Image: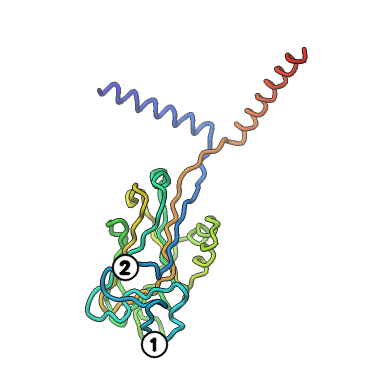
């Protein structure tokens, strides 16, 4: 059994070496986006244009969901489902989970210092966020993430109509996601929970997955075309001969 396993591994390594010799790996992106107000409230309370409870209408854009609005004594949890083909999930190497709010003054905030929010994907913890920073001239405590370099460019590269509105959002939170977080059955479930006295204005929940695509190296393509051209010339001369 050991010899068979070792032989199979050596064959795979040989195939990988040939592939790397002939092809170059380039990324392809598979993406899904859900509007904030499409989330399912599992516990607590949330506000949207479908269920307005806020004192100022400008806080609610077309697809805004304010998670935890008016929830003073219990946690609010909301979930979103992003549908992918199982084959795309299985080919994915990594990805980014993005949660965005259109408004600059929106996003995650609380009137109480030290409260928390949690982000979970497919029952795997992604992040726990503490609210301890109060910007000047604000009453609430916020969490303003430093957006990782390349996230906005990644959004633009996807080429979807919604990617422009997400990249233009006033507040963007993004997390790198490894393939270990993905559900290979296809549907990816994102759950956001906020403690009492915490609110999170959400307009977009997105998942961008990256999978490899192999294309012939330019020099290999040129050689292949040259060889095929030569073979075609020989065949044509033989047929006409």
Looking at the image, residue 236 lies above or below residue 184: above
In the displayed structure image, the side of residue 224 where residue 40 appears, left or right: left
Farthest-out residue, top: 241
Residue 34, which numbered label?
A: none
Q: Position of residue 231 (x, y in %)?
A: 67, 20
Q: Quadrant of residue 99?
A: bottom left
Q: Position of residue 187 (x, y in %)?
A: 36, 53
- The answer for how far apart the CA atoms under marks 2 and 1 are is 22 Å
In the displayed structure image, the side of residue 134 where residue 42 appears, left or right: left
- Of marks 2 and 1, which one's residue comes earlier in the chain? 1
Q: Residue at x 42, y 86 (%)?
A: 56
Q: Position of residue 63 (x, y in %)?
A: 45, 72
Which element type, helix, strand or loop, lies under badge 2? strand
Q: Quadrant of residue 1?
A: top left
Q: Nearer the viewer, residue 95 or 45?
A: 45
Would residue 96 be visible to someone looking at this image? yes
Residue 55, which numbered label?
A: 1
**Quadrant of the image for the C terminus?**
top right
How crowded pointer 1 is (Cα within 10 Å; few <14, some 14-19, many 20+) is rated as few
Farthest-out residue, left: 73
Q: Nearer the viewer, residue 54 or 213?
A: 54
Q: Residue at x 30, y 26 (%)?
A: 5
Q: Nearer the viewer, residue 163 or 23?
A: 163
Q: Residue at x 53, y 35 (%)?
A: 23
Q: Which residue is mark 2?
A: 78
Would residue 132 be visible to someone looking at this image? no
Looking at the image, residue 198 lies above or below residue 181: below
* Total numbered circles: 2
How crowded pointer 2 is (Cα within 10 Å; few <14, some 14-19, many 20+) is rated as many
Which element type, helix, strand or loop, lies under badge 1? loop
In the displayed structure image, the side of residue 152 where residue 51 appears, left or right: left
């Amino acid at each position: 059994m050991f010899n068979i396993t070792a032989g199979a591994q050596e064959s795979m390594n040989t195939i990988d070496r040939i592939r790397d010799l002939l092809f170059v790996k380039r990324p392809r992106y598979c993406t899904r986006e859900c509007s904030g107000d499409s989330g399912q409230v599992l516990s607590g309370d949330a506000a949207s244009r479908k269920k307005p409870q806020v004192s100022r209408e400008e806080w609610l854009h077309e697809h805004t969901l304010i998670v935890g609005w008016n929830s003073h004594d219990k946690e609010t949890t909301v979930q979103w489902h992003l549908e992918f083909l199982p084959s795309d999930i299985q080919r994915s190497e990594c990805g980014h989970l993005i949660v965005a709010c259109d408004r600059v003054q929106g996003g995650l905030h609380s009137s109480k210092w030290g409260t928390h929010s949690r982000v979970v994907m497919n029952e795997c913890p992604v992040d726990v966020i503490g609210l301890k920073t109060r910007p000047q001239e604000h009453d609430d405590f916020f969490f303003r993430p430093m957006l990782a370099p390349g996230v906005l460019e990644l959004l633009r590269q996807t080429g979807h109509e919604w990617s422009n509105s997400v990249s233009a959002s006033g507040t963007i939170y993004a997390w790198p996601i490894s393939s270990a977080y993905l559900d290979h059955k296809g549907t990816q479930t994102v759950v956001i929970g906020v403690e009492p006295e915490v609110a999170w204005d959400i307009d977009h929940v997105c998942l961008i997955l990256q999978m490899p695509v192999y294309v012939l190296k330019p020099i290999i393509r040129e050689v292949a075309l040259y060889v095929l051209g030569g073979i075609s010339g020989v065949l044509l001369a033989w047929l006409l001969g």
